Image (cartoon, grey):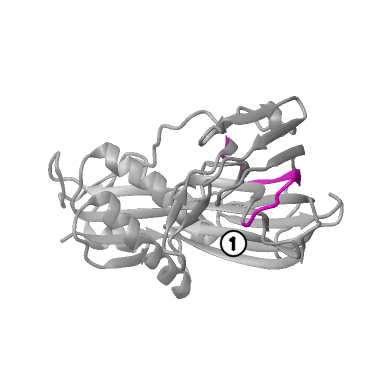
């Protein structure tokens, strides 16, 4: 059973514990083998001399975190993919955006990792789509539908969606069902710090009719913010965050005659802030959240749906990107 030894600059004990917890799930998923303990060591001359290793392939002067493994793995490409994914996780946990994870292994053969007294290294390597340069006008970026609606009109300034009955986004919690068929119009980016603003106008009149902002990563990892119609007296302004296949819903009741709302979606690495405004000037915080799959490339944009047997028109305008308006905590 392989063990994992994490070597790097000295880290506080609590940070080491957080990293150990964060590592365990990814290790099991990627290496596809039972795992032993996760050990942390300071990478220094004493450790290298103690084990009699000769360092080669550029592992001197790492300045980040190095993983040393013992036990079976599934080839160099798998290990490089692993490095890339663990780099994202470490950056999220430590708050160090420049941290790089380098896999160091003791080689004994093509199919296994063992110990021959020589350390080889691999940097994270992942083939990705080239990220587009962010254009301030959302509609000038390369957009894609998760599920294109039957009726939608896109102009240079607006997007109009006529919702279809029985469309929704929700996963498991409380209600027990899984709905994953709402249309979302999105763009992709790896930009780690930015804000996105949109104005929504809507003619909802049946329960749960909704439109707003969305970050849809996959069916089990996404967030959305909108107003959901309830009845003639009130509707629910709220947000849903879904991590690992379970949704939650945070709401506040507002008058049913409100038919316009602005939203501001902000990103700081894998943490996100959602705000709303009646006029596009004065914003109030709705939610701060962490997305477990939101550390690298993301997709975000707008959505509209009607979970029950209804249909309405949603109009999106004033969609623009800007410098992150969510200031760092001090």
Asked if residue 289 lies left or right of residue 275, the reply is left
Taking the magenta stretch, the answer to whether it contains residue 204 is yes
Q: What residue is shown at x 75% (from left), y 25% (from top)?
A: 156
Rendering coords of residue 236 (x, y %): 69, 62
- Looking at the rendering, the stretch of residues picked out in magenta corresponds to 187-207
| SS majority, magenta | strand
Rendering coords of residue 130 (x, y %): 52, 28
Crowding near the residue tagged with mark 1, few <14, some 14–19, many ≥20 C-alpha atoms within 10 Å: few
Considering only vertical position in the picture, is 308 above or below 234?
above
Question: Closest to the observer: 230 or 248?
Answer: 230
Rendering coords of residue 73 (x, y %): 20, 47
Question: Closest to the observer: 191 or 12?
Answer: 191
- Residue 10 lies in what quarter of the image? bottom left
Question: Closest to the observer: 300 or 309?
Answer: 309
Q: What residue is shown at x 39% (from left), y 42% (from top)?
A: 124
Asked if residue 57 lies left or right of residue 222, the reply is left
Taking the magenta stretch, the answer to whether it contains residue 11 is no
Q: What residue is shown at x 40% (from left), y 48% (from top)?
A: 85
Q: Is residue 63 visible?
A: no
Question: Which residue is under mark 1?
Answer: 289
* Quadrant where the N terminus is found in the figure: bottom left
Asked if residue 114 lies left or right of residue 182, the reply is left
Dot 1: what SS? Answer: strand
Q: Is residue 55 visible?
A: yes
Question: Closest to the observer: 107 or 164?
Answer: 164
* Quadrant where the C terminus is found in the figure: bottom right
Rendering coords of residue 50 (x, y %): 25, 63
């Amino acid at each position: 059973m392989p063990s994992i030894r994490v070597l790097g600059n000295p880290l506080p004990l609590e940070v080491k514990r957080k990293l150990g917890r964060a590592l365990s799930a990814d290790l099991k998923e990627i290496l596809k083998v039972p795992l032993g303990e996760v050990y942390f060591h300071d990478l220094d001359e004493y450790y290298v001399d103690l084990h009699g290793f000769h360092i080669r392939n550029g592992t001197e002067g790492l300045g980040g975190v190095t993983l040393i493994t013992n036990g079976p793995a599934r080839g160099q490409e798998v290990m490089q993919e692993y490095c890339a994914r663990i780099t994202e996780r470490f950056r999220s946990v430590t708050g160090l955006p420049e941290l790089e994870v380098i896999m160091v292994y003791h080689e004994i053969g093509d199919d296994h990792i063992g110990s021959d007294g020589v350390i080889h290294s691999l940097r994270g390597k992942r083939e990705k789509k080239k990220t587009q340069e962010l254009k301030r006008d959302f509609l000038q970026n390369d957009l894609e539908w998760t599920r294109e609606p039957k009726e939608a009109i896109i102009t240079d300034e607006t997007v109009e969606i006529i919702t279809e009955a029985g469309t929704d986004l929700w996963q498991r919690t409380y209600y027990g069902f899984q709905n994953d068929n709402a249309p979302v119009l999105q763009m992709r980016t790896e930009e780690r710090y930015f804000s996105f603003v949109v104005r929504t106008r809507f003619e909802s009149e049946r329960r749960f009719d909704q439109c707003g902002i969305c970050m849809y990563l996959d069916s089990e990892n996404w967030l959305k913010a909108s107003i959901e119609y309830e009845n003639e007296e009130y509707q629910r302004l709220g947000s849903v965050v879904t991590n690992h296949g379970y949704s939650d819903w945070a709401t506040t009741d507002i008058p049913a005659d409100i038919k316009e709302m602005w939203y501001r979606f902000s990103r700081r690495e894998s943490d996100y802030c959602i705000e709303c405004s009646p006029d596009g000037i004065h914003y109030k915080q709705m939610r701060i959240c962490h997305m477990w799959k939101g550390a690298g490339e993301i997709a975000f944009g707008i959505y509209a749906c009607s979970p029950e047997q209804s249909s309405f028109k949603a109009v999106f305008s004033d969609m623009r990107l800007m410098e992150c308006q969510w200031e760092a905590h001090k």
